[in-house]
Image: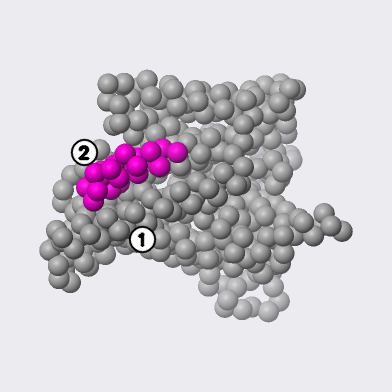
């Protein structure tokens, strides 16, 4: 009984804290420059619009987690509520997310390191960072929850210092007046709806990871209530914190002024408010992205391992476990090689959009699954079961349609390859599909 009590130890705010740590309080900083260019200076607006989209999806995730409390995965929800083929397609889109996350982290860290030490070429940093990711994961080193919390606290201090120095800078150099302070929300000279929607489709990256709360269902004290509430609250907390960060940044550095480097633009903004913050913020974001990239790489490796174990990929290679450290070493090495090559082929902008291509497909699937489960199949039809999932689906579809054509083409090629493979493996989706589910233990 004591062990059961210990497992059911996570209350509502424990779950919210976990969600904020996973997403990271610095979430909008790495993508700030790309968002500013794509939205023509309306970063705050894109962050808030993306929050609305994610709130509807968060409701669907939270409700589905009640039905499948130990699954916690979009492809499980879609596969069981719609059909296995749709679940397979959703799973394949998530494979793209898992593979792209280490790539964009490698790109960002390498570019920032090159800005710090320009004498060392970007390519050399890529090789070093990708090798470090792989070496650390091969050694089986894990970052504990306590270290993650410490890092989040450190990030919080840096964010607080940035707010203070930004406020000092703005009131010393700002133009004042309503037009100046409202410009980050709406600038009549540059506003274009297509640009804002395109930026919002990238801003979704700020919230990636909120669905991870559903994997804690078995450890929550009241999962049927708290998983849903915590998922929504996490999106709200991250949304308003992110909006405040980019609002201050846009007042400090107007969109009309080009950045020295788009990928690491926020670091230059921080440095403008107070010179030492250039190095402090850059180092903080490097640490944050290193943790994200390392975690993303082992997550991708575990996904490939699960597919190999299920015979979806060559089992002798991807399904192998290294006996000493008990890790999927071959899969880790494979993801490391992909991250290394991908960092030379993709820039941060395209990598982020391709990642969101897969994420938005998964989000649409979860909303549709929630609609079928709680509205179509229920005897009593309630508007509360109809409106959130349908709005979530439509908003995600709109954002997905506003991704760049290059990202859509690359994502379509990836999806076509996966569908073709599934069609061949299952003889026209007539035989049993591969089980893409990763248990909470494996993630």
Secondary structure of the residue carrying tag 1 is helix
Main secondary structure found in the magenta portion: helix
Specify whether residue 38 is painted magenta: no
Region rendered in magenta: 264-287
Viewer-proximal residue among 185 and 318: 185
Viewer-proximal residue among 398 and 190: 190
**First in residue order: circle 2 vs circle 1:** 1
Dot 1, how many residues are within 10 Å of its Cα: few (below 14), some (14-19), or many (20+)? many
Residue 419 seen:
no
Secondary structure of the residue carrying tag 2 is loop
Look at 63% across and 23% down and name the residue there.
330
Residue of label 2? 260
Left or right: residue 402 compared with residue 171 = right
Look at 30% across and 58% down and name the residue there.
164
Q: Give the image location of residue 178, x and y in percent.
A: 17, 72
Mark drawn on residue 243: 1
Q: Give the image location of residue 131, x and y in percent.
A: 49, 23
**Residue reaching furthest right?**
1
């Amino acid at each position: 009984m004591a062990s059961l009590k210990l497992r059911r130890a996570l209350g509502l705010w424990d779950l919210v804290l976990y969600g904020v740590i996973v997403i990271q309080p610095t979430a909008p900083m790495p993508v700030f420059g790309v968002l500013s260019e794509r939205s023509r200076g309306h970063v705050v607006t894109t962050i808030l619009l993306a929050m609305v989209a994610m709130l509807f999806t968060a409701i669907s995730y939270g409700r589905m987690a009640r039905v499948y409390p130990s699954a916690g995965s979009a492809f499980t929800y879609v596969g069981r509520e719609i059909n296995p083929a749709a679940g397979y397609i959703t799973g394949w889109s998530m494979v793209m997310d898992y593979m792209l996350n280490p790539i964009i982290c490698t790109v960002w860290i390498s570019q920032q390191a090159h800005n710090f030490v320009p004498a060392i070429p970007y390519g050399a940093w890529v090789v070093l960072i990708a090798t470090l990711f792989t070496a650390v994961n091969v050694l089986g080193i894990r970052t504990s929850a306590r270290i993650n919390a410490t890092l989040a606290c450190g990030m919080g201090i840096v964010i607080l210092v940035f707010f203070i120095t930004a406020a000092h800078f703005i009131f010393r150099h700002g133009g004042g007046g309503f037009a100046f302070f409202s410009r980050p929300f709406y600038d009549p000279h540059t506003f274009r709806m297509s640009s804002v929607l395109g930026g919002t489709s990238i801003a979704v990256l700020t919230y990636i990871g909120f669905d991870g709360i559903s994997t804690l269902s078995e450890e929550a004290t009241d999962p049927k209530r708290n998983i849903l509430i915590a998922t929504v609250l996490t999106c709200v907390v991250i949304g308003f914190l992110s909006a405040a960060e980019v609002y201050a940044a846009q007042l400090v550095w107007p969109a009309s002024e080009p950045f020295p480097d788009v990928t690491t633009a926020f670091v230059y903004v921080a440095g403008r408010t107070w010179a030492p913050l250039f190095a402090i913020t850059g180092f903080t974001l490097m640490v944050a992205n290193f943790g994200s990239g390392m975690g993303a790489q082992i997550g991708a490796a575990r996904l490939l391992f699960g597919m190999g174990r299920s015979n979806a990929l060559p089992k002798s290679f991807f399904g192998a476990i290294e006996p000493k450290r008990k890790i999927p070493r071959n899969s880790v090495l494979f993801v490391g090689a992909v991250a290394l090559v991908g960092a030379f082929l993709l820039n941060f902008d395209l990598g982020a959009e391709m990642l969101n291509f897969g994420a938005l497909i998964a989000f649409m699937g979860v909303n549709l699954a929630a609609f079928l489960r709680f509205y179509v199949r229920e005897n009593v039809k309630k508007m509360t079961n109809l409106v959130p999932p349908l709005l979530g689906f439509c908003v995600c579809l709109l954002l997905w349609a506003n991704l760049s054509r290059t990202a859509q083409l690359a994502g379509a090629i990836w999806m076509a390859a996966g569908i073709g493979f599934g069609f061949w493996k299952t003889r026209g989706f007539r035989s049993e599909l591969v089980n893409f589910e990763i248990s909470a233990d494996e993630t």
